[in-house]
Image: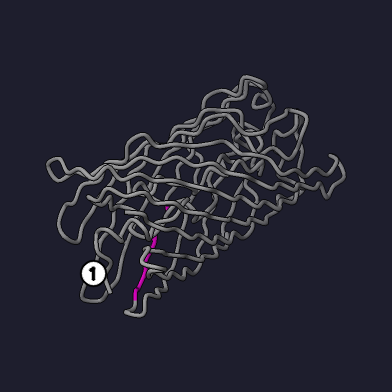
Amino acid sequence: MEMSPKRVFAGCGPRAGAAVVMLTSLGIGIPTSSQATETGIGRPITGMQIAPYAGIVPPTDDWIFSITSIYYEGSLGKTKEIPIAGTVSAGLNYHISYNLLNAIKTWGITVGGWNFASSFGVPLQYTSISSFNGRLPNDSATQFSDVFFTPVIAGYHLTKTDHIAFSVQMYAPTGAYSTSRLANAGQNTWTFVPTVAYTKLLPAQNIELSVNYGVEFYTTNNETQYHNAPVSVLDLLALKRFTSGWGIGVIGGWIQQLGNDSGGLANIAGVAGARGHSLGVGPLVTWSGKLSGTPVSASLRWVNEFDVSNRPKGNAVELSVSATFQ
């Protein structure tokens, strides 16, 4: 069964496309690592930036609230050095639990085929990092991560089955951060993510194909004078829905650093010039229906990173539940 425009937005979760403000996606302040980008490769996790109906902004006047939990487990080898905690180190294991409360407001207006929405998210993150080469002390903490917001998400309906959405997601440096710690939920930088998302619906087969692409631009960390290079993030989704409300699909993600870092520890040979990338793929299961008359949806995904360079390599699992209030 194809969802009506009122229910389309309820099916979206974080780390998502422009229509759901790219939550997460993912604004995880993971101090994971590569030989570039201070304390990590930036905010994204492979395959976590897209959600169902990524390119659709509905014409309705609704509030959509979602709760999302992402668990990431990965490791960086002994030969991969990164700038972290005021030094350069390698051989790190990561266990991250990123938990997010997100609110989306659809404006309920249509202008020349365009619809609009706004979003705001508050994340709480548990971070545990251990050094298996013994060069740094283990560290763990539960902290608020950087809040993020999207003032305007603009969606255009190309046809009844083709939809596109544009947004600029912003992260504010509000999360916990210390130059002396491994476990930081915040990144101490403003980040701006221009994003475009596209959704193609195949009503006869009840299939959705979506793509989400964004580039993350970082300000300089004023505590360390480190300036991260831009990071390109591409996510793909294919989903088959059934009349029972269930759906099954596949998620793919590609993260690629686009340039060299500068300033601070980036001036150390080998740190600034090693551009990280990762590729991952995994299954997706969704459900949508109503509880006491309220449209509710849920999704569960697992993404395995199988081709990684100068980044930690691991697995991510995401569970998201959302409800729409009209």
Residue located at (19% from left, 61% from top): 161
Q: Residue 38, how many percent across, how many down?
A: 64, 33
- The residue where tag 1 is placed is 202
Asked if 3 appears above or below 154 in the picture, the reply is below
Q: Quadrant of residue 203?
A: bottom left
The x and y percentages for residue 77 are 73, 50
Q: Dot 1: few (<14), some (14–19), or many (≥20) neighbours within 10 Å?
A: some
Q: In terms of image quadrants, where is residue 225?
A: top right
Residue at left offset 67%, top offset 51%: 96
| Highlighted range, magenta | 235-241
Q: Position of residue 233 (x, y in %)?
A: 45, 46
Instruction: Name the residue type under label 1.
Output: Leu
x and y, in percent, of residue 111 in the image: 15, 40
Give left or right: position of 79 versus 195.
Answer: right
In percent of the image, x 43 and y 69: which residue is there? 286
Which of these two is toward me, 291 or 299? 291
Q: Any magenta on residue 192? A: no
Q: Residue at x 58, y 41 (%)?
A: 41
The front one of 108 and 170 is 108
